[in-house]
Amino acid sequence: MFAGFGSQDHRGTPEAPGRVVTLIEKSYWEELTDHHDSAPEKVWGVAYRIIPEKVEEVKEYLDIREINGYTIHYTPFHPADGSASIKTLVYIGTPENEQFVGPQDPQQLAEHIFRSHGPSGPNKDYLLNLDQALNELSPKSGDHHIHDLAVRVRALEGTNGKLSS
């Protein structure tokens, strides 16, 4: 789900949190009041193999970066080429977290993303890069909601950021 969480520390600030992609449990998704399709059976992504001597360092970094309302899960990752699944660590968001914002009107969300900026850069760059990356993973990996938001943000760029009233 995109924009399930505010980002005060990367793509926004405490005063104006950006929005980031957040994986949530399917059971939470089904409880949300949203106009989008039901939760997909498959979530596309990339798994990174960390060399053994760096595992602790990387895990410490991720635990700090993802501390804002995520729980750690170990889950199988199924490579697109059909090779054997790999046990992976995944951070899953929870709706109980104060940063959870839930579903929003797509145009208002696009305008919020267009305006937001944090220490890691503009929130719109995060969205546009995510849309591109998802489309490059596989012909089946694109996400309708993310693509719709990317189209809306690009339209805002074309109007020099004049937001709807």
Image (cartoon, grey):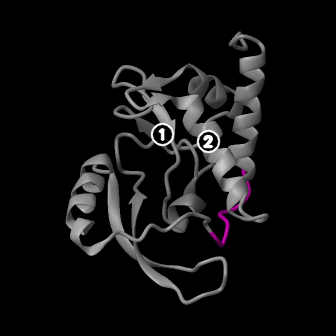
Residue identified by numbered label 1: 101
Where residue 37 appears, as percent x and y from the top left, is: 74, 57
Tell me the quarter of the picture where residue 70 sits: bottom left
Could you classify mark 2 by the number of other residues whose Cα lies within 10 Å: few (under 14), some (14-19), or many (20 or more)? Answer: few
Tell me the quarter of the picture where residue 30 sits: bottom right
For the C terminus, the image quarter is: top right
Query: Helix, strand, or loop for circle 2?
Result: helix
Front residue of 95 and 67: 67
Where residue 120 appears, as percent x and y from the top left, is: 41, 32
Judge whether residue 14 is colored magenta. no
Q: Residue at x 66, y 76 (%)?
A: 80
Where residue 136 appears, as percent x and y from the top left, is: 71, 56
Q: Residue at x 35, y 69 (%)?
A: 50
Q: Magenta part mainly helix, strand or loop? A: loop
What kind of residue is marked 1? Val
Residue identified by numbered label 2: 129
Q: Residue at x 49, y 65 (%)?
A: 25
Vertical side of 50 occupied by 3: above or below:
above
Where residue 156 appears, as percent x and y from the top left, is: 73, 20
What kind of residue is marked 2? Asn
If you read the primary sequence from the N terminus, does the residue marked by circle 2 or circle 1 appear first? Answer: 1
Question: Which of the two marks, 2 or 1, is nearer to us in this view?
Answer: 2
Tell me: 156 left or right of 27: right
Query: Helix, strand, or loop for circle 1?
Result: loop
Vertical side of 4 occupied by 155: above or below:
above
Mark carried by residue 18: none
Q: Residue at x 75, y 40 (%)?
A: 148
Judge whether residue 37 is colored magenta. yes
| Span colored in magenta | 34-42
- Measured in 3D between alpha carbons, the distance from the residue under mark 2 to the one under mark 1, in whole angstroms, is 22 Å
Could you classify mark 1 by the number of other residues whose Cα lies within 10 Å: few (under 14), some (14-19), or many (20 or more)? Answer: few
